[in-house]
Amino acid sequence: MCRLFHFLFRERIHESVAVSALIAVSAALHAMWMAHLFIFRAPSFAKYFLLNESVGIVFGLYLFGLLVFIVSGLVSLLYWRGRDCQSVRDRIFWFFVVTLIMYVLLTFPPIYGFEILMKAV
Amino acid sequence: MFGGWMARSAELPWVDIGSSLFVLLLMLLSVALVLLLLSSKLPNLYRPLTVITIVSEICWLMILALEMANVKSRTVFSDMETLSVLFANHRWLLVPLPTFFLLLAPIILLVYRTNLRDRHAKDYRRTVGLSLWGSLASLLLISFEALL
């Protein structure tokens, strides 16, 4: 009897959960730096992120990142559930590393504020 | 921490809750990094490591809640005005890094448990390490920029 239900209790590694978490964090960080850059370049867009007057647009930005994290996590969990993640393991890790580097660079004020001024001759 | 270092309303006469939480968070992260280094030899250390990362995330969210509840407009001095504003924006943008990293590390630890030291879990082991080091670095950077 125990052997019959053994499959229910065997220790499994749910790699799809780990892969989904990595994808979700990467997607959220990408979405946040893009949204921040977009707000910086098009200030009229900022009103959609101004959910709390005292904290400012950063509060809306955090909520947006959280929303992207939850949605992309659920979608990738549904996609990877029961699939073999072995082939994508390495690529997703490097996607995460590249995301981290991009986020750190593209939220640094001298980089996102960079602009070339053209003078009319 | 984000300028006005900690919440006025959260200050008790004998202790500043925000600063205490921040010090506790730094201590927890330091312990987590040591445990991560040791976990390659002692796989059962994943349990305290998981608990510490979850407690760290809770501490960080409490610090954020205290800060957001007490944000006040700050006076910036003329010489440092541009620099202060730039760094004020930058440290708020660094906040998602420890938030997401301290969420990612316990998820991977709960999934892999003692198997984290296996050969096939190399990328996940590196992810947990990167998350913990990244959290500590971004927290130190946030506190350093608050001094400017």
Image (cartoon, coloured by chain):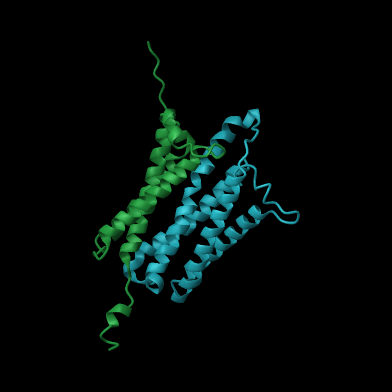
Chain colours: A green, B cyan
Q: Position of residue B148 (x, y in %)?
A: 62, 39
Q: Residue furthest top?
A: A121
Q: Quadrant of the N terminus of chain A?
A: bottom left
Q: Position of residue A27 (x, y in %)?
A: 35, 49
Q: Is residue A70 or residue B141 the one in the foreground?
A: A70
Q: Can residue A23 be seen?
A: no
Q: Is residue B96 or residue B33 the one in the foreground?
A: B96
Q: Position of residue A57 (x, y in %)?
A: 49, 37
Q: Image height check: is A55 above or below B27? A: above
Identify the residue shown where x is 58% and y is 59%.
Answer: B25
Q: How many marks?
A: 0
Identify the residue shown where x is 46% and y is 45%.
Answer: A62
Identify the residue shown where x is 42% and y is 67%.
Answer: B109
Q: Can residue B31 be seen?
A: yes
Identify the residue shown where x is 30% and y is 63%.
Answer: A16
Q: Quadrant of the C terminus of chain A?
A: top left
Q: Is residue A5 left or right of residue B145?
A: left
Q: Residue furthest right?
A: B13
Q: Is residue A78 left or right of residue A48?
A: left
Image-quadrant location for residue A11 = bottom left
Q: Position of residue B18 (x, y in %)?
A: 64, 53
Q: Image height check: is B89 above or below A44? A: below
Q: Is residue A90 left or right of residue A109?
A: left
